Amino acid sequence: MRKTVINERQINAIKYLTLMSKDAGEETKRIVFALLEASHYFTRSVYYTFDSEIASTGIHNMNSSGCSTHLSEVLEIAGTNFFFSCAYGFLAKKGFISSNRPGEKHTCTIWLSNISYDPKAMELDQDRINSVELKDHLYG
């Protein structure tokens, strides 16, 4: 596994691309900003669980090769082995529990980690997401 050294300017460049993205709305961008900040320059795996079809679609779109943001490729260029992943469900002590069953509310979990469904990731809460200020940290 490669060890990555990411600096503040690189994080701010990723935030800038996120801020300018037409692939997602403000809620999704706040989640991405919070995950980036909480990861401490890609040294800590983090996740956030929420109930929003819009935000989960936004994360998917920002990662998709069919859209314009290409977050996965941006993280690859930055040299980190961390990536964004999204799944319907939530983490519990016994592992990931899918909430994609008929009649259930669609809870979604988004990770920024170097492991899919990382059970050791640190959870962010709604207050952390709400405290994010969406602004240009690169040129502003």
Image (cartoon, rainbow, N blue to C red):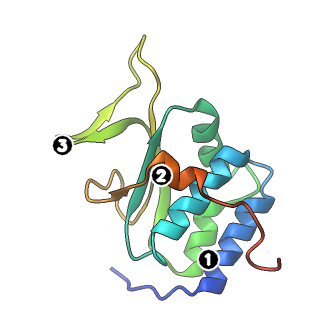
Image disc number at residue 11? 1
What SS does tag 3 mark?
Answer: loop
Q: Earlier in the sequence, mark 1 or mark 2?
A: 1
* Mark 1 residue type: Ile
In the rendered structure, the answer to whether residue 72 lies left or right of residue 123 reads right
**Residue in the picture at 34% in, 61% down:** 115
* Mark 3 residue type: Lys
Front position in the image: 116 or 120: 120
Crowd band around label 3 with a 10 angstrom C-alpha radius: few (<14), some (14–19), many (20+): few
Is residue 135 visible to the viewer in this orientation of the structure?
yes
Is residue 63 visible to the viewer in this orientation of the structure?
no
**Residue in the picture at 60% in, 48% down:** 59
Pinpoint residue 86: horizontal percent, then vertical percent: 48, 45
Image disc number at residue 115? none
**Distance CA(mark 3)–CA(mark 2):** 20 Å
Q: Earlier in the sequence, mark 3 or mark 2?
A: 2
What SS does tag 2 mark?
Answer: strand
